[in-house]
Image (tube, helix red, strand yellow):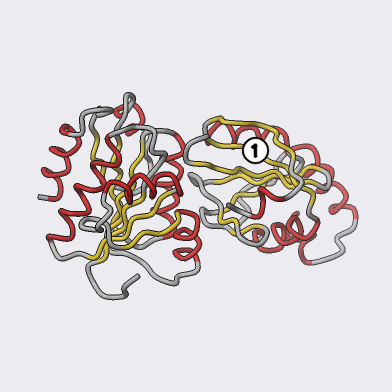
């Protein structure tokens, strides 16, 4: 059992297909990042799924897929500034798309005043 | 786990479809007779079904928890030459894609169950497909395996 199951998570979708879960994250996140299978989050969860695997950021929450062999795919949300920062930093070079409202707003701010290399990259 | 050559990993999915347990035992025996070291990965329930079926360990040598196996493969603690992923649902597909991404093994997708053909069509990752509409009767899947791996 992963440590995630011991944490205070929100279940946003239950027992759906992996494709449905990915589409939900893409449609309901401020920022969307794509990771490969095996991407590690928290202490011991190595993500399972069909690439490209979407991970979302919405406010303070990270949205991600959680696959169980007998129960399908779940979309979970967990507050973790550390994991969100790590996702942004580690995936910066591999980000294929940064979508949706939040990302657009972020872009506008960045255009006004780039403050770091990461900000410049986002342009 | 051994680190020699000729290592095969059998990845079990949800054990709710009866043919899985018998085919895993059959394939494990077949690969061991061919000189391979076989490790079987699965959930706690799937592994218990195997171990109760083979109490003396004639067909099952090494077993490992599925999540631990994935962690070990990602961290490159070991790898395999062949990886057989059993799948009859969408989760199985996701595990197959994961194995294809994290292991350098040649991946075989063993697709069975009521919707085997439709499920097999959705496989877009590198894997040799072995597909049979088998739920209770393992023979169609056994025959397909014999054709593919001899």
Above or below, comparing residue B149 to residue B70 in the picture = above
Residue placed at 50% from the left, 47% from the top?
A51
Residue A85 position within the rendered picture, expressed as x and y whole percent measured from the top left: 76, 59
Q: Quadrant of residue A92?
A: bottom right
Residue B75 position within the rendered picture, expressed as x and y whole percent measured from the top left: 50, 68
Of helix, strand and loop, which one carries label 1?
strand
Foreground pick, A6 / B113:
A6
Residue placed at 81% from the left, 56% from the top?
A81
In the picture provided, is B122 more to the left or to the right than A90? left
Name the quadrant of the C terminus of chain A: bottom right
Chain containing mark 1 = A
In the picture provided, is A106 more to the left or to the right than A26? right
In the picture provided, is B9 more to the left or to the right than A41? left
Foreground pick, A8 / A57:
A8
Q: Residues within 10 Å of mark 1 (few under 14, many from 20)?
A: many
Above or below, comparing residue B97 to residue B61 in the picture = above
Foreground pick, A5 / B93:
A5
Q: Quadrant of residue B135?
A: top left
Residue placed at 52% from the left, 31% from the top?
A17
Residue A6 position within the rendered picture, expressed as x and y whole percent measured from the top left: 70, 50
Residue placed at 68% from the left, 41% from the top?
A76
- Residue at numbered disc 1: A75
């Amino acid at each position: 059992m992963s440590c995630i199951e011991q944490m205070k998570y929100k279940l946003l979708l239950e027992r759906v297909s992996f494709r449905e879960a990915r589409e939900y994250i893409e449609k309901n996140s401020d920022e969307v990042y794509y990771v490969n299978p095996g991407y590690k989050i928290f202490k011991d969860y190595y993500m399972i799924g069909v690439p490209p695997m979407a991970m979302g950021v919405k406010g303070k929450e990270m949205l991600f897929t959680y696959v169980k062999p007998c129960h399908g795919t779940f979309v979970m949300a967990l507050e973790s500034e550390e994991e969100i920062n790590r996702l942004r930093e580690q995936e910066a070079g591999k980000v294929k798309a940064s979508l949706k409202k939040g990302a657009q707003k972020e872009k506008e701010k960045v255009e006004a005043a780039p403050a770091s290399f990461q900000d410049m990259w986002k342009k | 786990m051994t680190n020699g050559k000729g290592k095969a990993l059998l990845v079990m999915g949800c054990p709710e479809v009866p043919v899985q347990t018998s085919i895993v035992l059959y394939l494990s025996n077949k690969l061991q007779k061919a000189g391979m070291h076989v490790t079987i990965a699965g959930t706690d329930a799937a592994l218990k079904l195997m171990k109760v079926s083979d109490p003396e360990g004639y067909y099952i040598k090494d077993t490992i928890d599925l999540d631990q196996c994935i962690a070990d493969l990602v961290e490159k603690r070991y790898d395999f030459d062949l990886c057989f992923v059993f799948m009859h649902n969408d989760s199985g597909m996701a595990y197959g894609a994961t194995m294809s991404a994290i292991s350098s093994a040649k991946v075989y997708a063993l697709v069975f169950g009521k919707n085997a053909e439709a499920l097999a069509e959705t496989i877009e990752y590198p894997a040799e497909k072995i597909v049979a509409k088998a739920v209770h009767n393992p023979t169609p899947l056994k025959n397909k395996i014999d054709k593919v791996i001899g």
